[in-house]
Image (tube, helix red, strand yellow):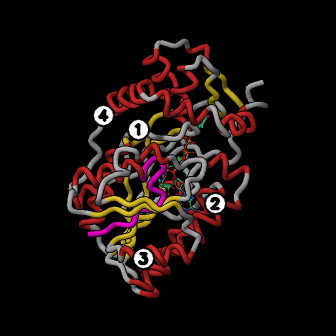
Amino acid sequence: MTILVTGGAGFIGSNFIHYMLENHYDYKLVCIDKLTYAGNLRNLEKVLGKSNFRFVKGDICDRELVNKIFEEESPDVVINFAAESHVDRSIENPDVFLMTNVLGTQVLLDASRKYGVKRFHQVSTDEVYGDLPLERRDLKFTEESPLKPSSPYSASKTAADLLVLAYHRTYGLPVTISRCSNNYGPYQFPEKLISLMIINAFNNKPLPVYGDGKNVRDWIHVKDHCEALNIILQKGKEGEVYNIGGNNERENIEIVKMILKELGKPEELIRFVKDRPGHDKRYAISTAKMEKEFGWHPKVDFEQGLRETINWYLENRDWWEEIINGEYMKYYERMYGERLK
Ligand code: NAD
Ligand code: DAU
């Protein structure tokens, strides 16, 4: 079995590659990644020399290159992680989100059709459903919930989902889609809530909490996400969408306080700053379909998973110091400079 993993040098993709190579010794994994600011070959250090792993630096929008990889490797399965993934950056500049997330997905779908695959899996997000009101804690997104994205990022992911489903209906391409909630864990680029707050707290820098900090996200450990993806690749039905969630809803401010407590830092570091435009209130995902069809449920306890993640960042300071000493500071200044004045 050969799996083409796109975006495998990013946070979830690299965790998935590690997970699959640890659990399926007989699989070959081929990764294509453009190595944008979010892609980091250090995330794949442990597997780069393995005989059943190949890394190709390249853009999923590059049709010629994508076709060449299909000709050389004849992948049985394609799993598409490659994306621009950060909501705040999509608000600053939507262009590249449309390019990679929509047109890049189309290039992969075309190659999958042309050369034939057993499965094309699209890694999508719960953000395609928009948000839920804070005061209706009984509501959760199911696979049937209407698509109502709020940001350029989530709109681009929704467009890609619809394209994937259209290729199934029109051309009979064997596709599946998963829509997951907020991931946390090792190798997460320090622009997302948990990774950014850990690093700022460690460095005694202010922790910028958007609005009143009461927005709710459903956090899942990346290991649980990878396990669910593997199950869908093995047992998922063509044309189906599967929601993946952590059954773990938390207000942002609660998470920030947990991180400060774990690191022994004072709450005075918290700064409530100008809100994100169009900020989604609450995400909550029903995992009933994954549980009913495959008996899957998330296993990592949040307190334990967060503690382990904090320890990973403490033990891998050189990994994130290299990041925050580069281009990152310019991004940080653009995103937070005014807000933290
Ligand atoms: P990430 O930003 O950490 O990694 C994205 C990777 O894609 C990087 O390695 C980057 O170099 C690569 N990439 C970007 N554009 C590319 C292109 N044109 N060609 C080839 N490679 C390209 O993202 P992540 O958090 O690991 O998310 C991975 C996927 O999972 C995304 O599709 C995202 O929408 C989805 N997702 C993320 C979360 C989350 O909480 N992070 C939750 C649900 C779904
Ligand atoms: O739900 C899945 C999605 O989760 C994925 O599809 C996205 O790729 C991923 O980036 C994530 O999107 P969010 O916007 O929910 O994640 P982020 O970590 O950026 O923000 C989480 C919450 O924390 C959100 O309510 C905004 C808030 N926040 C974020 C940052 C970066 C802050 O209050 N301060 C911050 O500095």
Q: Where is residue 56 in the image (x, y as percent from the top left)?
A: 47, 62
Q: Which of 58 and 196 is in front in this view?
A: 58
Lower sequence index among marks 3 and 2: 3
Q: Name the residue under label 1.
A: 185
Q: Where is residue 241 in the image (x, y as percent from the top left)?
A: 39, 67
Q: Does the residue labelled 4 lie within 8 Å of ligand 1?
A: no
Using a 10 Å C-alpha cutoff, classify the residue at mark 2 as few (fewer than 14 neighbours), some (14 to 19) or many (20 or more). Answer: many
Looking at the rendered structure, the secondary structure element under dot 4 is loop
Pair 3/1: label in front? 3
Q: Name the residue under label 4.
A: 301
> Residue at horizontal 58%, vertical 19%?
203
Lower sequence index among marks 1 and 2: 2
Lower sequence index among marks 4 and 2: 2
Please give the range of residues in magenta.
1-13
Looking at the rendered structure, the secondary structure element under dot 1 is loop
State the quadrant of the C terminus. Answer: top right
Q: What amino acid does circle 3 point to?
A: Phe
